[in-house]
Image (tube, rainbow, N blue to C red):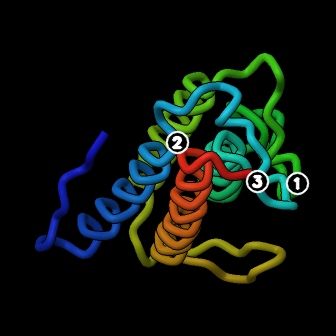
Amino acid sequence: MSVNIIRSGTERLIIENTLDRNRSALIDAVRGLSESDARRRLVASLTTPISLIKHAAAAERIWFQRFWAGLDAAECDGYAERDEGTFDVGAHESLAGVIAEFERSSRLSRTIAARFDLDDTKVNPVEGELSMRWTLLAMIEEFARHAGHADILREQIEAGGG
């Protein structure tokens, strides 16, 4: 799924478009992999193509559902703790299912973010006072980094590496 680039408009429109393009780039980097290739561990960490998507869905929940909407972890639509569990993919989960989970979390994040102005702030016990602008930009950074990871993993998989 490709998201059109918006090069002019309000700051919010451009930020949200950039975030959506990075969400899309992350999905596009793993879409079409076989189930076994999606789970291949090519690096020492828990990073696999499918775990990057699972982690991104958790990041959406942690920042938008928990932090901005104030939900408890148990109230979120999936795993929402700040730990290594964000990379945990169950044996029963398919790549298509994990992508759909990320897309659902992203839609809910958009709805939650729309309730706030870019300059609205909340205090996070770890990071301190954060604005919605900071959160959106942090998600851009997070998903761009992981899309790059996914691109490299896919390149290794397609080259027969590992």
- Alpha-carbon span between mark 3 and mark 2: 14 Å
* Lower position in the chain sequence, tag 1 or tag 2: 2
Q: Secondary structure at mark 3?
A: loop
Q: Which mark is residue 10?
A: none
Q: Are marks 1 and 2 in contact (CB under 8 Å)?
A: no
The one of 40 and 88 positioned closer to us in this rendering: 40
Q: Residue at x 84, y 50 (%)?
A: 81
Q: Secondary structure at mark 2?
A: helix
Query: In what quadrant of the picture does the N terminus appear?
Result: top left
Q: Is residue 109 above or below residue 22?
A: above
* Lower position in the chain sequence, tag 3 or tag 2: 2
Indicate the quadrant where residue 142 lies: bottom right
* Residue highlighted by disc 1: 84
Q: Is residue 91 above or below residue 109?
A: above
* Residue highlighted by disc 3: 42
Indicate the quadrant where residue 127 lies: bottom right
Q: Residue at x 66, y 39 (%)?
A: 50
Q: Are marks 3 and 1 in contact (CB under 8 Å)?
A: no
* Residue highlighted by disc 2: 30
Q: Residue furthest bottom?
A: 128
